[in-house]
Image (cartoon, helix red, strand yellow):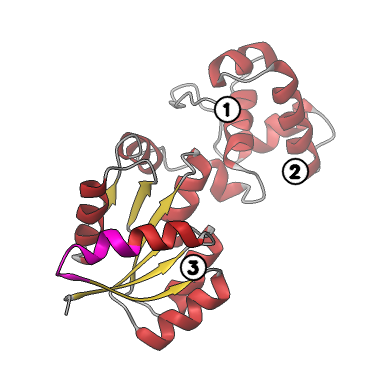
Amino acid sequence: MGSISVVLADIHDVVRSGLRVLLASDTDIRVVAEADDSAEAVQTVLRHRPDLVVMDLDAAAVREVLRALPGVRVLVFTLSDDDDAIYQAIRAGARGYLLKSAQQAEIVRAVRGVAAGEAIFGEGVADRVTELLTAPAHRAEDAFPELTRRERQVLDLIADGRSNSVIARQLHLAPKTVSNHISAIFTKLRAADRAEAIARARDAGIGTRHRHLTSITA
C-alpha cells in the first residue's frame, strides 16, 4: 500500500482517470477517493483524511477543504495559468500549482513534494509566484479586495498617472479592454471619476513610481 494517500478532485472524469492511472504506477502513492465538486471534495476529505488533495476547483474550494481538514496539503492541477488564479490559490492555502500540460514525471514529483511539505510550482508558474510573493507591502488587494487582480494592476497604473494607451501597451491589452476595466474599478470603488479613484488608491499606498508591475498577456 502506498504511504502517500491522495484524493483527486476534478469535474472531469477523464482527468481523474488519467491521474489515477498515472499515480498508481508509483508504489508509494495511493489514490483513496475522488470527487467532482467542492461539496463532495470536503466530504471525501473528511471521510478519508488523506495526506494530499490534487484538485482543479476554485480557490473557495481550496479554503473549504483546508478548513475541513487543517494540515492536509493541496496541489492545484489545472489548465489555468492566469496570475489571478495562481495568486488566489496560494492565498487560499495551496502548497503547489501545476499546469495540466506538465509531463508525467513532473506530476509524480509534485505529488511527492507537496505531500512531503515542499512548495511545488510547475514550469512557467514558479517565476510568476516569486513576483506575486515579493510585491511591495502596500498592495491593492489588501485595500480593495473587491477588485480582480487585473483591475488592481490597472488601478496601480492609473494611480501612477499613466494614460489608457500606456496602460494598454504595458499590460498587452486592447484599449477597449482597459476602458472596461477602468469602468469596473470606478463602479466597485464608487469613485465618481478618475481623479477620485487616483486619490483613493494613493491614500492606500498604491501607485508609487518605484513599484514594479509584471506585464502579462490578457
User: Which residue corresponds to the image point at 53% horizontal and 66% vertical from the top-left?
Assistant: 61
Q: Disc 2 vs disc 3: which is toward the camera?
A: 3
Spot occupied by residue 46 in the image (x, y as percentages of width and height): 42, 85
Residue 71 against residue 81 in the figure, above or below: below
Tell me the quadrant of the picture where the C terminus can be found: top right
In the rendered structure, which amino acid carries the disc numbered 3? Arg
**In the rendered image, which residue does mark 1 sit on?**
218
> Is residue 27 found inside the magenta-colored segment of the image?
yes
Q: Secondary structure at mark 2?
A: helix
Q: What residue is disc 3 on? A: 63
Q: Is residue 129 left or right of residue 181?
A: left
Q: CA distance from mark 1 to mark 2?
A: 23 Å
- Amino acid on which the number 2 mark rests in the picture: Leu
Where's the N terminus, which quadrant?
bottom left
Q: Position of residue 71 (x, y in %)?
A: 32, 75
Residue bearing the label numbered 2: 189
In this view of the protein, which residue sits in the foreground, 38 or 153?
Answer: 38
> N-terminal of the two: label 3 or label 1?
3
Q: Amino acid at mark 1?
A: Ala
* Residues rendered magenta in the picture: 20-29
